[in-house]
Image (spheres, rainbow, N blue to C red):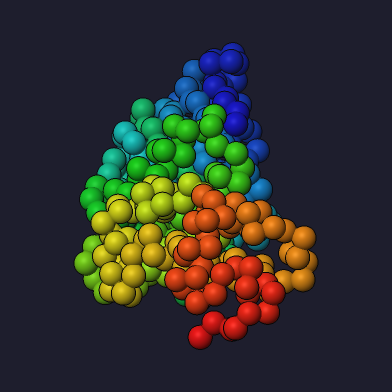
Amino acid sequence: MESQSTGEVDPRERADFWSEHIGSYQSRMGYRYARTDNFRGETVRQRTDRYQLVRFHSDEVEYSRTAGQVREEPDEDYRLLLPLSGEMVLRQDDQEARLTPGTGTLVSFGAPFECLQNPSTQGFILTIPAREMDGPLNRKSPLATGLDLSRGLGRVIGSMVNDLYTERDHLTDPQFNAVSDRLVELLCMLATGDDRPDGSRHLTDVETMVRRYVREHAADPGLTGTSMARALGWSLRQIQLALQRAGTTPRDLIREERLRLVRERLRCGDCEHLTITDLAYASGFSSASALSTAFRQRFGVSPREMRNGGRRPL
């Protein structure tokens, strides 16, 4: 995490400082200032090897990226723009998005654009790798359409971006990436218009992402429906509804995934040195007894019997 401010340099040099500073972590652009004497601006930047989040505020400035700059310095990644105050106007690919607080937009640096920012604008810019967006969106073209972040899924996205910034001193790089991954998945749903809280497609997508999250975190003893909802940016009720359609619950899904994990390890020669107690703790169970009870109910044999070649589960 790093912060920079024009207040650290001579007022006559602040516009040049800002151009050089922004250009150091964004691709090549042009800058047009309403006034070059005593320009004021400040940024706070968080970044990992995959994502970058910048909170900024500054005086009036117009950014542009020409076709020549696109050719000379290719950059296919997307930026999510979210103003917190003031107004931004983005023009790209014959589209225009007028952004005020409660709205946002996606822009690609892989095509020319103009972005006018009025005085005293504050906001966020999240850099998203193109590979994370092009597949789900089924496109390789710029987006300059406005996104409603004032309600529903859009509001959840806005809150997640703000939380990433607020918790910047308490997140490791893997945690920052994990939250950003969830945010991008939700953003793709919003960008494609699938933000209906009760739509069947939405619930199917929720179920898919919940199942993937449980597979990845089943061994975490602290995994619950509530912790999963917090991590994914949904309400617990949304997750419960999505899994209810599939005939299960968050608790049952977590238990099933942990049991599957134990069964795979019991059948794995590389895990023969692990005791049943070791397997229980390594798979998210609170004790060997809790594992044995759940395992026998599910598969009809105890973990030890399966390891010793007992009758196979049905």
Residue 83 relative to residue 62: left or right: left
Who is closer to the viewer here, 96 or 75? 75
Who is closer to the viewer here, 142 or 66? 142
On the image, the x and y values in percent for residue 169 come to 54, 29
- Residue 123 against residue 156 in the figure, above or below: above
Which image quarter is the N terminus in? Answer: top right
Q: Residue at x 59, y 52 (%)?
A: 281
Q: Residue at x 48, y 25 (%)?
A: 41
Note whether residue 193 is visible. no
Note whether residue 41 is visible. yes
Who is closer to the viewer here, 116 or 194? 194
Who is closer to the viewer here, 86 or 288? 288
Q: Which corner quadrant of the image does residue 121 belong to? A: top left
On the image, the x and y values in percent for residue 231 come to 43, 49
On the image, the x and y values in percent for residue 42 come to 50, 26
Residue 293 relative to residue 102: left or right: right
